[in-house]
Image (cartoon, rainbow, N blue to C red):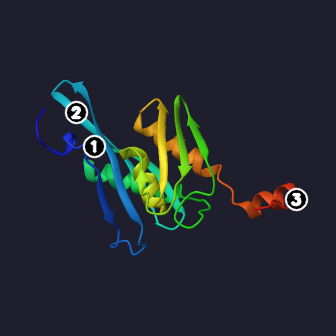
């Protein structure tokens, strides 16, 4: 394998997207190169898995495809901005334990005490850091496919509810 942009699938690129003026954190989780054989040789195309978050409870994931790396990252970032979701946080961590599912990928996310940090693999860490979670314990179960794992993290995040929301939905008061 040669050196170049297609060989960066193990690295993560994080940047503060200040040129857009929106102040969002954009992280490239994975870049994948695929090739099709044509009459004149191989034609390469690239796909980029991008996470965008504001660091305060909003995060989105996008998957962009193009014939070159920068364009695929740009498309992934645009898709991630469109797909941003809000979720509740309690201080620097999650309100409760949750298990996210997508396909055969599962991820267990547990709230952690202050100072623990983000204990997660590279794929899940990208979403949690971009979302602004600073103390969390995670365990990935099943498939480790980055696309499915990111969607499992988003599924888990979408299940989060704070105590006041649960009380309102059930019509009861929950004691501390």
Residue lying furthest bottom in this view?
A: 21
* Nearer-N-terminus badge (1/2): 2
Q: Are marks 1 and 2 in contact (CB under 8 Å)?
A: yes
**What residue is shown at x 19% (from left), y 24% (from top)?**
39
**What residue is shown at x 83% (from left), y 57% (from top)?**
169
* Residue 67 numbered tag: 1
- Left or right for 61, reference 176: left
* Residue 139 numbered tag: none
Q: Give the mark count.
A: 3
Q: Provide the secondary structure element on which disc 3 rests.
A: loop
**What residue is shown at x 35% (from left), y 56% (from top)?**
27
Q: Give the residue at mark 2.
A: 43
Q: Are marks 3 and 1 in contact (CB under 8 Å)?
A: no
Quadrant housing residue 21: bottom left
- Left or right for 142, reference 30: right
- Left or right for 108, reference 95: left
The residue carrying pointer 1 sits among few (fewer than 14), some (14 to 19) or many (20 or more) residues within 10 Å by Cα, namely: some
- The answer to whether 53 is drawn above or below residue 18 in the figure is above
* Nearer-N-terminus badge (3/2): 2
- The answer to whether 80 is drawn above or below residue 24 in the figure is above
Q: Position of residue 10 (x, y in %)?
A: 26, 42
Q: Give the residue at mark 3.
A: 172
């Amino acid at each position: 394998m040669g050196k170049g942009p297609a060989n960066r699938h193990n690295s993560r690129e994080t940047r503060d997207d200040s040129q857009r003026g929106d102040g969002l954190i954009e992280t490239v989780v994975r870049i994948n190169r695929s090739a099709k054989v044509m009459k004149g040789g191989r034609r390469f195309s690239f796909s980029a898995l991008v996470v965008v978050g504001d660091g305060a409870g909003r995060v989105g994931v996008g998957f962009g495809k193009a014939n070159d790396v920068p364009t695929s990252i740009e498309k992934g970032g645009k898709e991630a901005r469109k797909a941003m979701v809000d979720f509740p946080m309690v201080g620097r961590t999650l309100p409760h334990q949750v298990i996210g599912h997508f396909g055969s990928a599962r991820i267990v996310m547990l709230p952690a005490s202050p100072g623990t940090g983000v204990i997660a693999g590279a794929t899940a860490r990208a979403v949690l850091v971009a979302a602004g979670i600073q103390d969390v314990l995670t365990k990935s179960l099943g498939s480790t496919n980055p696309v499915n794992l990111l969607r499992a993290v988003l599924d888990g995040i979408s299940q989060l509810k704070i105590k006041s929301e649960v009380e309102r939905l059930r019509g009861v008061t929950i004691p501390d």
